[in-house]
Image (tube, rainbow, N blue to C red):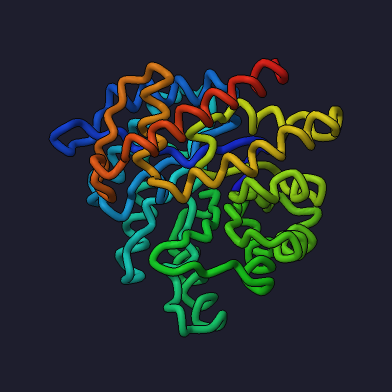
Amino acid sequence: MSAKTIADGVWPTMITPFAADGAIDYDALGALVDWYIGNGVTGLFAVCQSSEMFHLSLSERVSLSQACVRAAAGRVPVIASGHVSYALDDQIDEVRRIADTGVHAVVLISNRLAREYEDDEVFLRRLDRLVSALPDDLLLGFYECPFPYKRLVSPAVMRYGVESGRFGFLKDTSCSLPNMREKIRIASGSTFKLFNANAASLLESLRSGAAGYSGVMANFHPDLYVDLVANHRSNPERAERLQGFLGLASVIERQYYPVNAKYALSMEGLPLTTASRTRDPNGLTEAMKLEVEQMTAVAGGYRGEVG
């Protein structure tokens, strides 16, 4: 059992900056980490799907995790995944190697442990083998990653996480308040916390006991998520107005992510290109850029309100 826990708040799913030649741009990564921290986030979720981890080699995933820990320099904790392999032995190796980079926790991808047609019995058997092969003090998490298919954490798996004492983080992508509330109920009284990835349901999930936000929109305006999570109880009227904007703005995720996020970050003055391994950056049209620019301008108005 790990003595570490995950703090409530906002955990951005980090993007990976790439240079024009396709290599990871570590200088830009350092500037990006500073930007997240400057916007008040609680911690960083590195080497995830937003990081294009399925298009990174194992050595790149390890190097990226190390670089994020080094750039954060203890200012905020870093958690990471990089859990992309199919074979269980390969998964054990990659999780151990990510853990050795000094991250606060390693996040497991829920669809890696069973095929879409396999049931919880298969999932839990493989999960138990994986967890048993890892250091006892390694804090773990789950991410309901939509690629290559979305496998939600079931009540049985949630109970395993609670009873094992090994899990502290769940990035929930169910987009379903009843589903989230059931998971929160099962984890009640434990240190296993649910972080909602869905912006539209964020406020209601916080009111239901969610610990915070971990999603792609923290690559656009993380400070607004920080304010909502921190102050939704003390200033409920402002929280309602802010939620209305955040939910609507989140549709930009369906536009041309992660290229549009890289464009938005370049507008913040960060030294990022729109280079990506998952999408052709030339696919970000002029109209799409205008949409990002206009959303950013509106976010600035809410930023002035929350201070």
Identify which residue, 75 or 180, lies in the foreground: 180
Instruction: Please give left or right for residue 253 compared with residue 85 in the image.
Output: right
Residue at horizontal 64 percent and vertical 28 percent from the top = 224
Using the image, determine if residue 171 lies above or below residue 9.
below
Q: Position of residue 256 (x, y in %)?
A: 38, 46
Instruction: Please give left or right for residue 16 compared with residue 159 in the image.
Output: left
Identify which residue, 275 or 138, lies in the foreground: 275
Instruction: Please give left or right for residue 279 compared with residue 174 in the image.
Output: left
Identify which residue, 111 or 238, lies in the foreground: 238
Look at the image and tell me whether residue 1 can be seen: no
Using the image, determine if residue 184 lies above or below residue 284.
below
Q: Residue lying at the far front in this picture: please name it.
A: 287
Instruction: Specify the quadrant of the image occupied by residue 124.
Output: bottom right
Q: Position of residue 108 (x, y in %)?
A: 47, 58
**Quadrant holding the C terminus:** top right
Q: Residue lying at the far left in this picture: please name it.
A: 21
Residue at horizontal 51 percent and vertical 49 percent from the top = 138
Q: Position of residue 44 (x, y in %)?
A: 50, 35
Q: Position of residue 139 (x, y in %)?
A: 55, 49
Look at the image and tell me whether residue 114 can be seen: yes
Give the mark count.
0
Residue at horizontal 59 percent and vertical 20 percent from the top = 300
Residue at horizontal 79 percent and vertical 34 percent from the top = 232
